Amino acid sequence: MSEQVLDEETWPQEAEAAINDIRKHVKFAAISPRLRSSNQCVFINITTLEESHYCVEMSALGFRIVGNQYNDNTLTSDIYETPYAMLDTISVKFRESFGKELINKLADLANTRSEVA
């Protein structure tokens, strides 16, 4: 018997949190309106900055690409622990965008510390 980590109502909330974390670094991300959430997983449609479309399964195991178009869960792929690791693998522009944001945040932190000192 499989372990129930979250319920059907909680998975979409967790997916929205993951979507909010990556929103600045993808063109589009939303919960699939066609593939139903369960107590095991939720499906997220993503368009990368390169205009590639994916359907991603989010489960207790992590994130897994299950389709090369929205609302498609016919593929199997590697499981990634985070959406960042998955997107880093499939989108060079994600890596660049995420890296730039990180550099800017570190620069802001350095500036704030030098102003306080």
Image (cartoon, rainbow, N blue to C red):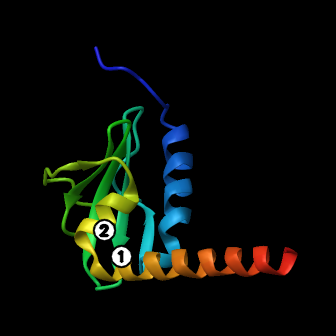
Q: Quadrant of residue 1?
A: top left
Give the residue pinned by disc 1.
95
Hey, what amino acid is under mark 2? Asp
Side of 80 relative to 74 (left or right): right
Residue 81 higher or lower than 107, as above or below: above
Which residue type does callout 1 highlight?
A: Arg
Left or right, 56 with respect to 114, comes to left
Q: Residue 100: x, y in percent? A: 48, 82
Is disc 2 placed on a helix, strand or loop? helix
In front of the other: 11 or 60 = 60
Q: x, y percentage for residue 113? A: 77, 73
Q: Is residue 29 left or right of residue 106?
A: left
Rendered position, 19 above or below 92? above
Q: CA distance from mark 1 to mark 2?
A: 5 Å
- How far across and how far down the image is residue 62, in percent? 34, 44
Name which residue lies at 20% across and 61% down: 67
Q: In this view of the protein, can residue 32 be seen by the observer?
A: no
Q: Kindly check if marks 1 and 2 are in contact, taking CB atoms under 8 A apart as contact.
A: yes
Residue receiving disc 2: 88
Name the spot of residue 16 as percent of width and height, x first. 54, 56
Does 100 sit above or below residue 57? below
The image quadrant where one finds the C terminus is: bottom right
- Secondary structure of residue under mark 1: helix
